[in-house]
Amino acid sequence: MSKPTTNRYTVLAPAKLNLFLHVHQLRPDGYHNLNTFFQLVDLCDTLTFQTRTDNHIVIDNPVLRDSREHNDRHNDKPNEDLCYQAAQRLKAVTGYPYGIDIRIDKRIPIGGGLGGGSSDAATVLYVLNQLWQTHLPREELLAIGLALGADVPIFLVGENAYASGRGEKITTAASPFSHAPATLVILYPKVFVSTATLFHTPRLKKRADSHAMPVLSDVFFENDFTTVAFENYPEIKTAATALSQFSPAHLTGTGSCLYAVLDDPKKADTIRRALAHKYDVFIVNTINRSPLLEFSL
């Protein structure tokens, strides 16, 4: 294989919202069965890839590097970075001999339940599979993605979808909002939530396993982690109360971010003015297709 030429590519990695999230019983493999609907939104991280002519994988993620409050995810330990793991696993599976520089400019909050780390990792797998000309089929990329995290496969699929199992059983579906794109407000209380803490909270109620995916209109905005998130992180409950003054607030995923669907997009500026002094406020629109799928050499 000849050495690659040095080229640079920039790709957007979108966030997701869980329009509902049900947790079921513990599986023999130590994971829980889940049912959810993933809705993509246009809040994105930006990943820049530059090919290398040596075999090094170099990740530059300033938010993780500079964030002392998340020291266990600090970039001084690059092998613990999900993007590094994604690149390394693809390299190991395919035997690709060269490396990559990846710069990650984050907008998606860490630990917020928006899937930013998983989206970044999916972007690495998708892009490098083309840049490195490894050409793994989608099923193999999905398997690598699932080994990295339960949310990674949905970002590789790149469309709104129902998901079950650990997140690997995916059925794409149209966005449920009658007006598309729908405008939403996402509120980040600046709290990092430990997914493990929520799963191991004794008061978390786990549903009986069911093979039937619920009708979305019947379970809209149900998140089984809401009560335990509010109990373990009072700041989230306080933020939910603040957002609910303008529109009903809903928890996404197993993180700290709350979102509200606006019946009038003009409310967005009112909410920002009222709450931005205390919280990170993002005004977003729903999307039907990830910008990642537009990447092609």
Image (tube, grey):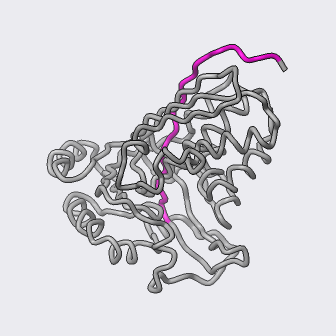
Q: Which residues are magenta?
A: 2-20
* Left or right: 85 as drawn, with respect to 280: right
Q: Position of residue 203 (x, y in %)?
A: 44, 85
Viewer-proximal residue among 238 and 91: 91
Q: Position of residue 177 (x, y in %)?
A: 46, 51
Q: Main secondary structure of the magenta part?
A: strand
Residue 24, above or below 183? below
Viewer-proximal residue among 124 and 221: 124
Quarter of the picture containing the C terminus is: top right
* Left or right: 293 as drawn, with respect to 248: right
Q: Position of residue 197 (x, y in %)?
A: 46, 73
- Residue drawn where x is 53% and y is 64% of the image: 216
| Residue furthest top as drawn | 5
Instruction: Tell me the quarter of the picture where residue 257 sits.
Output: bottom left
Instruction: Tell me the quarter of the picture where residue 122 sits.
Output: top right
> Does residue 9 show up magenta in the picture?
yes
